Image: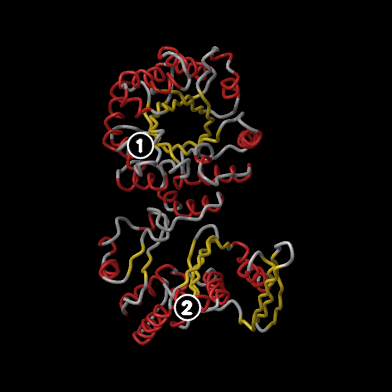
Amino acid sequence: MEQVKLYDTTLRDGMGGHGMSLSVGEKLKVVQALDALGVHFVEAGFPSSNPKEAELFELLAEQEPEQATIAAFGMTRRRDRRAEDDEALAVLASCFAPVVCLVGKSWRLHVDKVIKVSAEENLAMIGDSLAFLREQGKRPVFDAEHFFDGYRDDPAYALECARAAADAGAENVTLCDTNGGSLPGFVAEATAAVIADLGGGAEVGIHTHNDAECAVANSLAAVEAGARLVQGCVNGYGERCGNANLTSILPALQLKMGFEVVSGEQLASLTATSHYLDELCNMTPNPDRAYVGRNAFAHKAGMHAAGVATDASTFEHLDPALVGNERDILASELSGKATIRSAAEHAGLELDDAAAARAVERLKEREHAGYHYEAAQASFALLLRREAGAYEPLFELEGFRVTTEKRRGGRVETEATIKVEVDGERYVEVAEGNGPVNALDKALRAAIGARHPHLADIELTNYKVRILDEAHGTGAVTRVLLDSTDGQHEWGTIGVSENIIEASWEALVDSLAYAFQPR
């Protein structure tokens, strides 16, 4: 099979996303995760832009990835000096990274108004810089910034810029949709024009942004037109609306377009890698993310659930196991015994007709009371385990107390006391937190953590509260939804009560208990 290579730019372009900030150690873990996934090139950033980047390059020089090639990023020479006299190019030439990606202008608007040089000088800046790096033993990649806007404005000049890079020895000329406003048909047309113009003088790549919600589609369109390197970020991190999402591009290339990208085993680690990188980057996983999201292969009661039970291909575009995900049968008050039994079977449980009927009635009762199991599949799985007699509680609750005190100066202190029994032993723990749920969580973990070390891996990632019957004011029923992760899997739980702390406690206990149930 023909190969398409992946070039991840999370550590440079991805860091432009809102809230993205990583320590040197975390950046190293990102590189290691991408390497294990089989990504061919990992762009580690500007080696001289700040002390953090400099330290990362020093660490990578000592412990290079097993498979991935590290790339350094920089810009073409300054307009007022020769390439060999440009300090930034000298740093790139001296760093250990074998691949150096240089960004340069390919849109006349930027040439005239941003770097303010003649069209001829811009071409010289591109050619001189890439030739210098080639002479220094580097493998140069040229990122043609704003290429598609430039091609739309002045096709001949945009092609000249790509040709200048190829003639100077660029290994790859990557076409960038920097503003993210192009559509797939135009991207394919422009990419094909570049490939024809270069005539094999350099490989062509694609780098797209998602401002028009077309970054993945544009990347695939460019590959169909002949591009053989795709730049982007796992999970689509990046400035504004993000970069092209390699988590969607990788399986599309390999499973739908027939290209060789990574091994089957590496592809099966895609979901776990996606969630792990969200964890590292302190981002809440998007449950609706294609291929790897919690809802990517979720089916609600009715024709879809029945169809999947008969033949998964009826309502699934591929086997979720190929990307390391799994099927979910969503439950609601519309569910019947067949859906319940299918969900139980998926959870590794056996329900006879009587147990399935009880589960259906229990589900309908609780949904009528305000539970919404479609949004809390872990709590639904625990409901099924209870009906099947397979639920394994982590502890027996004797009681808990939460106090919140507001002091002079606005300071608020919350303290939780928990009394539980585990294997016949009684534990009493007190913990302070930044709110009732946090305090309860800390106290419970302190009480049972020694018996259940896996608790240390579990983190609450999202906490949502909804008032179900607003007309009752402060006495209304409250629904609490929690999202949790252990760094590899994510799950949702629910609690409902007139008391917000009781609802939170119920969701919290489910979130921890689910992590210890057989799956």
Secondary structure beneath disc 1? loop
Residue at 56% over, 63% down: 460
* Picture quarter with the N terminus: top left
For residue 120, above or below residue 296: above
Q: Residue furthest right?
A: 408
Residue at 54% over, 53% down: 279
Q: Classify residue 441 as left or right of residue 332.
A: right
Q: Observer-nearest residue: 234 or 16?
A: 16
Q: Which mark is residue 472?
A: 2
Residue at 40% over, 83% down: 365
Which residue does the numbered mark 1 point to in the structure image?
A: 181
- CA separation in Å, label 2 and label 1: 48 Å
Residue 204 on image: x %, y %: 36, 28
Q: Of the residues shown, which amino acid type is indicated by label 2? A: His
For residue 119, above or below residue 393: above
Q: Of the residues shown, which amino acid type is indicated by label 1? A: Gly
Q: Residues within 10 Å of mark 1 (few under 14, many from 20)?
A: some
Quarter-wise, where is residue 421 in the image?
bottom right
Q: Residues within 10 Å of mark 2 (few under 14, many from 20)?
A: few
Residue 497 on image: x %, y %: 51, 78
